């Protein structure tokens, strides 16, 4: 993995998870113990280096977003969905 400056120092001096993806929580079942949620490296990294006002910036982009004259509807639609997800990941489609 190639990291530079602050991200490299963060990587060298942090106790980071070994897996890239999150491990989802699994409730206990008959004869099977529960597995707690564990954040993967991707989630930890993105949370560490996200701008403090990231949500406000994305919300401003969402409010100002208009479809361009040469932009197709599908591209505009998916861009709006992406911005909505950036503002609130729990928002339904």
Image (spheres, rainbow, N blue to C red):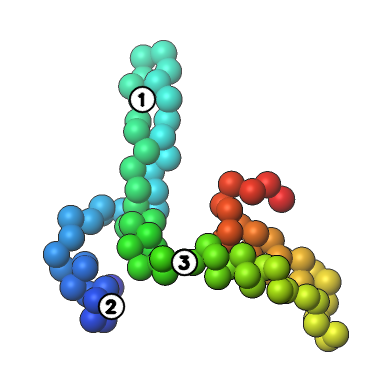
The numbered mark, 1 or 2, whose residue comes first in the sequence reads: 2
92 in relation to 52, above or below: above
Task: Kindly identify which residue carries mark 3.
Answer: 53
Q: Is residue 51 left or right of residue 66?
A: left
Of all residues, the one furthest to the left in this rendering is: 13
Residue at 16%, 68% in the rendered image:
12
In the displayed structure, does residue 59 sit left or right of residue 75? left
Q: Which residue is mark 1?
A: 34
When asked about the image quadrant of residue 29, the answer is top left
Where residue 8 sits: x, y (%)? 22, 75
Q: Pick the quarter of the image with the N terminus.
A: bottom left
* x 58%, y 68%: residue: 58
Q: Can you tell which mark lies on residue 2? A: 2
Secondary structure under the numbered disc 3 in the rendered image:
loop
Taking depth in this image into account, of 18 and 38 the one nearest to the observer is: 38
**In the image, 52: left or right of 83?**
left
């Amino acid at each position: 993995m190639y990291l530079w400056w602050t991200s490299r120092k963060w990587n060298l001096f942090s106790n980071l998870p070994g897996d890239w993806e999150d491990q989802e929580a699994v409730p206990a079942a008959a004869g099977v113990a529960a597995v707690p949620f564990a954040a993967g490296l991707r989630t930890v990294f993105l949370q560490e280096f996200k701008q403090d006002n990231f949500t406000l910036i994305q919300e401003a982009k969402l409010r100002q977003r208009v479809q361009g004259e040469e932009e197709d509807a599908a591209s505009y639609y998916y861009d709006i969905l992406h911005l909505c997800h950036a503002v609130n990941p729990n928002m339904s489609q």
